[in-house]
Image (tube, rainbow, N blue to C red):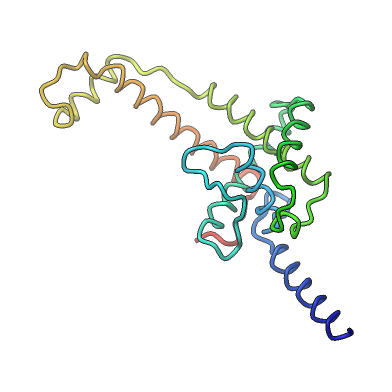
Amino acid sequence: MHLLFALLFSSQVQAATMVTETVGQVADYVTTSREVQISTAIERILFPGKGVPTSIEVLPDQAGFRTAVASVLLETVVATEAESFSVAKVNDRDVQEAVGKVEKAVAGKPYWSQLEVSPVELKRFTTRKFVSKNFLKFKTSSMTGIITDHEAEAYYEKNRVKFGNMAFESFKENIKAFLAQQQLEERLRSWFEVIKRKYKVRNFISG
């Protein structure tokens, strides 16, 4: 009996060590591998989409874990910036509905049970996710620029080989949409770098 208890306790300690490894930091806030696992599961349940894995599981030894860490750190720093400006508030009802959806999706799943997620943690991580996404929408709308016909035509002329003998007018709107998206992505990347420096974001498993 004592041996069995010792073995069980040992396995629990090993599991706890695995899920509480420090993987990053945003200002004074430390992010653990366990938090990344929880946040990633919530993300996949609430925001499924093309290219998003259907499984809620992401383990520290899996290839996708590095990407998950980067995503959680970015989410954290965006939410931190949002809170500093008191913007991107979320509706409590939306959060409660989201929490309910997550609870229903993870019910009975051993992976989630092993993470021992408290109701407070689930609500906090879900709220942070909403704050981050809402603020990102706000920033995206403010960064979206207007591409002129002149800019679009300049791109067309520079890349004539891609368009063959088709006239500029046939591609104008598509080119403008492409250039606007490219411009937005560049502005977002620059902004991400600014706020990551501002909050001294550190990713301990990047590279």
Residue shown at 78%/32% (left/top)? 96
Seen from the viewer's position, the closer of residues 196 and 14 is: 14
Is 11 situated left or right of 133 in this image?
right
Numbered marks: total: 0
Seen from the viewer's position, the closer of residues 121 and 142 is: 121
Seen from the viewer's position, the closer of residues 31 and 52 is: 52
Q: Residue furthest bottom?
A: 3
Residue 204 in picture, x, y percent from top left: 60, 61
Is 112 situated left or right of 53 in this image?
right
User: Which corner quadrant of the image does residue 202 belong to?
Assistant: bottom right
Q: Quadrant of the N terminus?
A: bottom right
Residue shown at 62%/50% (left/top)? 56
User: Which corner quadrant of the image does residue 48 belong to?
Assistant: top right
Is 38 situated left or right of 204 in this image?
right
Residue 132 in picture, x, y percent from top left: 65, 35
Residue 30 in picture, x, y percent from top left: 72, 55
User: Which corner quadrant of the image does residue 180 belong to?
Assistant: top left
Residue shown at 78%/26% (left/top)? 93
Seen from the viewer's position, the closer of residues 52 and 71 is: 52
Rendered view: 14 above or below 102: below
Rendered view: 164 above or below 170: below
Rendered view: 73 above or below 151: below
Q: Residue furthest left?
A: 165
Is 66 situated left or right of 81 in this image?
left
Residue shown at 54%/62% (left/top)? 62
Residue 116 in picture, x, y percent from top left: 79, 56
Q: Is residue 189 visible?
A: yes
Q: Is residue 32 visible?
A: no
